[in-house]
Image (spheres, rainbow, N blue to C red):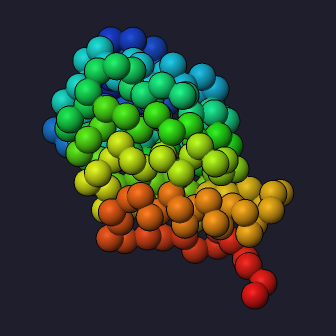
Amino acid sequence: IPNSRFQCQGSLSDYAACQCREQDSELSCINAQFVDTDIFLHVNNLYRHLRKVTFHGNNFQDLPNSPLFGRNKHENIEVLNISANYIVNLHSNALRGMPNLLVLDLSNNEIVLKEEDINFLSHTPKLKQLYLRRAFTLLVNRTVQFSLMMRMFRKANLEQLNVSFSFQIDI
């Protein structure tokens, strides 16, 4: 039985894999097997005050081309962990509405960067830490991917970057 002390309210209470720690302003949905990013819209209802949001171990594949949490601004979100979700496609508007995001973890995904993704980090001007450990698929041209990634980074103001084991480039 999941710990009812951390059971979420509202529509997220239907999911045992989701825990809400009000004291820590934290929501985590781990290994919930979600496939539809519409689940992020549930955060709008009761959880606009959250500082840390984790969706780990799902199967989203595509981030939406609209803001992840819908049209509402989420001024309080500072940490977004969307690691290990089989994410392939980022889409440049997905991070809109989180102007105070400091930490983004995209590790252990299957990301394939496209030209339009170079603006992916442009909506998060305060982003300081970006984790991309094993974030990229090995199935596409790494030189092109690396080039797109560097262009994306140039548009961001990053202080800390973890990209270990993401690319092996033979020079």
Please determine whether, in this image, residue 133 is positioned above or below residue 119: below
Question: Measured from the top left, where is residue 67 in percent x and y?
Answer: 42, 28
What residue do we see at 29% from left, 14% from top? 45
Question: Measured from the top left, where is residue 104 in percent x and y?
Answer: 41, 52
Q: Is residue 93 visible?
A: yes
Q: Is residue 155 left or right of residue 107?
A: left
Q: Could you tell me how many numbered marks the image carries?
A: 0
Please determine whether, in this image, residue 73 is positioned above or below residue 159: above
What residue do we see at 35% from left, 65% from top? 158
Frontmost residue, 147 versus 94: 147
Quarter of the view holding residue 48:
top left
Frontmost residue, 38 versus 97: 97
What residue do we see at 33% from left, 63% from top? 157
Please determine whether, in this image, residue 20 is positioned above or below residue 110: above
Q: Is residue 52 left or right of residue 85?
A: left
Q: Is residue 57 visible?
A: no
Q: Quadrant of the C terminus?
A: bottom right
Question: Measured from the top left, where is residue 109 in percent x and y?
Answer: 64, 51
Quarter of the view holding residue 5:
top left
Q: Is residue 28 left or right of residue 150?
A: left
Question: Measured from the top left, where is residue 28 in percent x and y?
Answer: 40, 37
Quarter of the view holding residue 33:
top right
Please determine whether, in this image, residue 116 is positioned above or below residue 67: below
What residue do we see at 35% from left, 43% from top? 123
